[in-house]
Image (cartoon, rainbow, N blue to C red):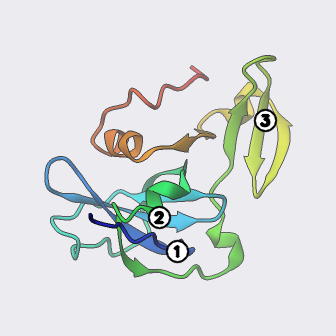
Amino acid sequence: MTSTKRKRIKLGDVYAVPLPDGRFAFGRRFKDASIAIYRYIGKSVEDIPQNEDYQFIVGIYDDVLKSGQWTVVVNRPFEDEDEAWPPPACVIDKLSGGYSIYYKGEMKRASKQECDGLEIAAVWEAEHIIDRIMGEDKWHKDPLK
């Protein structure tokens, strides 16, 4: 019987995300159960991004990060608490069709135009994040269009 050691999640941890083509993407843990996925794709776990340039930031289930499936390769502390928050995200009420913006733990009503260009608030599983990194957009349909 093999046991997978569950890991403690820390802000600023950078995870190596194994991709189906043998390369590695990297994601940095933010507040609000979010992860920022770097634009940089490495050839190995050690080939980490050199700057904080992200392709997207989404919510992620904690069990993905605690499972040990993605290895923590480094911790990059945030310069201040404000930097650790993910950017605003759009929330669309499925019943009313109304729009809100979620930011720093608070929800504020918004218009469709105010939500334009924002990530739709959602919590993602590992395979959906990997699909998006690999260019498969079936998990990222923009309901604003």
The total of numbered circles placed on residues is 3
Query: The C terminus appears in which quarter of the rendering?
Result: top right
- Disc 1 designates what residue? 8
Question: In front here: 127 or 36?
Answer: 127
Q: Where residue 133 appears, x then y in whole percent?
A: 33, 45
Q: Where residue 101 appears, x then y in whole percent?
A: 76, 41
Q: Judging from the image, what secondary structure is the residue with disc 2 in?
A: helix
- Disc 2 designates what residue? 66
- Disc 3 designates what residue? 100
Question: Real-space Cα distance between discs 2 and 3?
Answer: 30 Å
Q: Residue at x 58, y 22 (%)?
A: 143
Q: Judging from the image, what secondary structure is the residue with disc 3 in?
A: strand
* Amino acid beneath label 2: Lys
* Amino acid beneath label 1: Arg
Lower sequence index among marks 2 and 3: 2
Q: Residue at x 48, y 59 (%)?
A: 36
Q: Is residue 72 above or below residue 66?
A: below
Q: Is residue 143 above or below residue 48?
A: above
Q: Where residue 93 appears, x then y in whole percent?
A: 76, 25
Indicate which disc residue 29 carries. Answer: none
State yes or no: discs 1 and 2 in contact (Cβ < 8 Å).
yes
State yes or no: discs 1 and 3 in contact (Cβ < 8 Å).
no
